[in-house]
Each structure stands twice: as C-alpha cells, then as structure tokens.
C-alpha cells in the first residue's frame, strides 16, 4: 500500500541556533517481527524530490521482500514533517539535515533520533547574466534561502566561489551585506523561502545570482548551463537522513534505515540524478 498527500506550502522554519545533534542507530532486530507475507506499514513524511522518489523506489522494488510497506506522505514545506512526527501522525520523516534537526530540537523541544546520511542536495549558485563567478559585477543582486541553516550554507558556497570573504557561522544577509570586508563587491543580498528562490530567479530579471537548494533545482528543472558554483558532496555534513521519535526504533524503521543505505538505492540515486543535483552520502 502506498498513498501520497501533497500539502500546501506554509513556509520554511525559522531557526536561530546551529548546534550539534547526535545520530542514533536503530537497535531493533529488523528481521525479528517483519513478515513479507504480511508487511508492516510505516508512514514516512518526505519532501517530494528526491526524498519521496527514493522512498517510492524502495517501496516498489525492495520493501515487500523486506516485510515493510511504505506509506509516503509528501510535504512541500520544512515545518510540518517534524510537527507531524512529534504528534504521532508519522512514524518517521526524511527531509532534513543534522544542523536543521538540531535547531528544531533545541527551539521546539522535539525528542527525535536519526540514522546515517542518505544523500546530499548540494547548494548551487545559478546566474542567467554571468558565465563565471569571476564575471559577477559590483552591486549584483544575490538571492539566498531565508532559513539560517541553509542561508549560511549558501554564503559558504559564495565564499568558495570568491564572491564573499571570511564568512562566520553566525553571519546572515543582514550582517554581511554592509560589511565591505566580507562583501567586497557590494552585492545586494536578499532572501526568500527555499521553494520561492527558483521561482524568483526565473521570473525576476533584477536577480543576477541565486543560491538554490538541490531538491528545488530538480523540481524547477533549472538550466544546468547557468551554474556558477556548487557545494561539494565530499565529507558534506549536510546529508539528509531518516528521523524518528527517540526510543521508538521499531523493526520497520530499522529495516527502512537499512534499505536507504543499500547498493540498490545508491545506484538509483547515481542514475536518476546523474547531473550531480543529488549525491549519495554513503
């Protein structure tokens, strides 16, 4: 059984702390109580791309033999997957990074555990006006994600591309825009919800550069020829993973965690997103 529920966009969570959050390996014996003839349903919330795609691949190709049946619930925002997990509407979710989860847990008191990283959606710098990062001119308008975790990731990519300098972990568009040392080109830094950044980039000619999350690159079908710079996947701490309520590592969750790190899933990721917009993290 599999069903999808597309939920309306409600905006990206606002968070202000970047703290560490430890992972927790499922301790349940995944094979002990799972029966392929009577699979256990596990309800998982996920972003549409690539998380739901990966879960659907597992559900269609690997789950039944493993004794689980994944009920995929799609969310178009970064808030509801955690509130739904906390209130018991979901058994697990798959959409977030360690830094984002740590902030959510600190700010909202969630008691969650998570597995190992599955994939990275690299932050990518796009421009319709410039062919190379070194061509970006003074005063160019740059659009970034407005949630603090991904905004600092975006500014790090801009720093690696030579457009910003000496970015600190607690920086934001507000602290950097007027700082001549950090912003020597006097770039006009703006931000918006993650799902809106590609929309504005495609429709607003005043935006010279945009830094876009990998999953929204796929959804918006952006032109890869417009890429100026991209976050590296190697040793990237921003991998997405499976999250569940702490202390509720059921056999079905343990089995799904195992399947998410299977050779079949790695091959699926590499073949489906061969443009590098999604990278396996294992």
Image: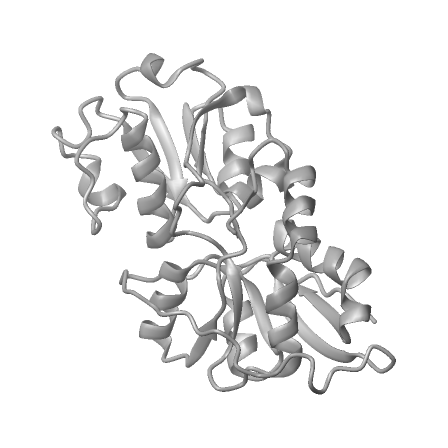
Give the answer, above or below, for where 243 lies relative to 152.
Answer: below
Quick check: 12 left or right of 51?
Answer: left
29 or 230, nearer to the observer: 29
Q: Is residue 116 visible?
A: yes
Q: How is the structure coloured here? A: one colour
Q: Is residue 75 visible?
A: no
Give the answer, above or below, for where 269 lies relative to 249.
Answer: above
Q: Quadrant of residue 261?
A: bottom right
x, y percent for residue 150: 38, 49
x, y percent for residue 134: 32, 15
Quick check: 183 left or right of 188?
Answer: left
Residue located at (35% from left, 44% from top) = 153
207 or 1, nearer to the observer: 1
Q: Quadrant of residue 163?
A: top left
Q: How many marks?
A: 0
153 or 190, nearer to the observer: 153
Residue located at (22% from left, 44% from top) = 174
Residue located at (51% from left, 35% from top) = 200
Quick check: 72 left or right of 181?
Answer: right
Quick check: 120 left or right of 135?
Answer: right
Give the answer, above or below, for where 149 lies relative to 201.
Answer: below
**Quadrant housing the N terminus:** bottom right
Residue located at (26% from left, 42% from top) = 173
x, y percent for residue 22: 36, 70
x, y percent for residue 41: 75, 78
């Amino acid at each position: 059984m599999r069903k999808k529920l597309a939920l309306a966009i409600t905006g990206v969570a606002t968070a202000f702390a970047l703290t560490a959050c430890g992972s927790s390996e499922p301790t349940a014996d995944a094979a002990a109580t799972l029966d392929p003839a009577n699979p256990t349903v596990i309800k998982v919330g996920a972003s549409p791309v690539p998380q739901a795609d990966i879960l659907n691949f597992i559900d269609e190709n690997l789950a039944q033999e493993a004794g689980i049946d994944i009920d995929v619930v799609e969310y178009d925002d970064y808030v509801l997957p955690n509130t739904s997990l906390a209130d018991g509407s979901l058994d697990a979710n798959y959409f977030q990074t360690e830094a984002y989860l740590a902030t959510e847990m600190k700010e909202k008191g969630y008691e969650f555990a998570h597995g190992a990283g599955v994939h990275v959606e690299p932050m990518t710098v796009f421009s319709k006006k410039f062919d190379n990062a070194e061509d970006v001119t003074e005063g160019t308008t740059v659009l970034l994600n407005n949630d603090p975790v991904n905004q600092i990731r975006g500014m790090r990519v801009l720093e690696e591309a030579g457009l910003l300098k000496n970015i600190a972990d607690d920086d934001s568009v507000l602290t950097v825009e007027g700082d001549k040392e950090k912003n020597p080109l006097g770039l006009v830094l703006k931000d918006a919800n993650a799902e809106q950044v590609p929309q504005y980039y495609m429709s607003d000619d005043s935006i010279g550069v945009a830094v876009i999350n990998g999953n929204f690159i796929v959804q918006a079908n952006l032109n890869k020829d417009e890429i100026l710079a991209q976050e590296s996947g190697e040793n990237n701490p921003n991998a997405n993973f499976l999250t569940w309520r702490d202390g509720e590592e059921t056999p079905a969750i343990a089995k799904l965690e195992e399947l998410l790190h299977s050779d079949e899933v790695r091959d699926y990721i590499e073949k489906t997103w061969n443009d590098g917009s999604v990278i396996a993290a294992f």
